[in-house]
Image: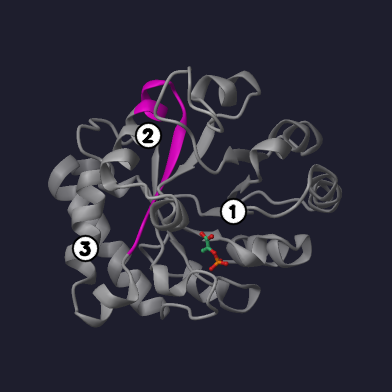
Amino acid sequence: MRKKYICGNWKMNKTSSDALEFAKKINDFDFEKVDVLIAPSFVCLESFRKNLKNEIIVAGQNVSEFDDGAYTGEVSTSMLKDISVNDVIIGHSERREKFFESDEIVNSKVKKALEDGLSVILCLGESLEKKEENKAVEFVREELLKSLDGVKNLDKVTIAYEPIWAIGTGKTCSSEDAENMCKEIRNIIDEKYGEISQQIRILYGGSVKPANAGEILSKENIDGVLVGGASLKAEDFIEIIKAGENL
Ligand code: PEP
């Protein structure tokens, strides 16, 4: 049985003080049936983690594929581990589109993070153009296989299916379409990796809100949600966690 995973991605929002206010609110809320993760900005990571209850996982939103050295503005796996951050989101569509991260770069980051013992949430998903050309499955297959090229063990990998046209737009993929794509992803993983396909968690992301979280989370092949906008308000994020708790 795969435990549902409720993940928040704050993107470039919230100062460290904002993050501490959020921590105070969410620390009072108890949950037991789901796993919960929040990815704040790098500058908030350490203080947020220290002020948040241990049940909530704190993750980076990105990590470098390099060890250390002349990479201005980058953050390494060892820097994350040094502050007890052991999870990272890699390949978010905003990184791919706005910071030109190719499948090859994403693949290097995934391999580096896994080699160094981090758990990875690998994001992927098609553009509106690919969807309208009826090439969404083909695109997602290629993105998945390229992003995981050379990765032998998926024990520490979670996949987040996030159709780009549904991110931050208010347009949600129907729960049936999201379920179908997550099932396709599971089948592709099964072809390539075998049995682990039944254990790996596959999340949906794209305009998830308290109002639609329950329906999305009720689907068999959707093991959780990656939430952007609605994770910024503690009250909304708590409602989404409750949707997972109440299944
Ligand atoms: C995201 O940032 O991964 C995301 C899904 O954003 P939103 O929930 O705002 O669409």
| Disc with the residue nearer the chain's start (3 vs 2) | 2
- Say which element carries label 1: strand
Numbered badge on residue 9: 1
Q: Position of residue 62 (x, y in %)?
A: 50, 40
Q: Which residue is mark 2?
A: 109
> What's the magenta region?
112-125
Residue 136 lies within the magenta run: no
Q: Is mark 1 within 8 Å of ligand 1?
A: yes
Between marks 1 and 3, how big is the CA–CA gap? Answer: 24 Å
Frontmost residue, 104 versus 100: 100
Residue sitting at the far left? 191
| Disc with the residue nearer the chain's start (2 vs 1) | 1
Numbered badge on residue 139: 3
Q: Position of residue 21 (x, y in %)?
A: 86, 50
Q: Quadrant of ligand 1?
A: bottom right
Q: Is residue 237 above or below residue 196?
A: below
Callout in the foreground (2, 1): 2
Residue 73 figure quarter: top right
| Disc with the residue nearer the chain's start (1 vs 3) | 1
Q: Are marks 1 and 3 in contact (CB under 8 Å)?
A: no
Q: Does residue 124 appear left or right of residue 133 in this picture?
A: right
Residue 84 figure quarter: top right
Frontmost residue, 136 versus 157: 136
- Say which element carries label 3: helix
Between marks 3 and 2, how big is the CA–CA gap? Answer: 20 Å
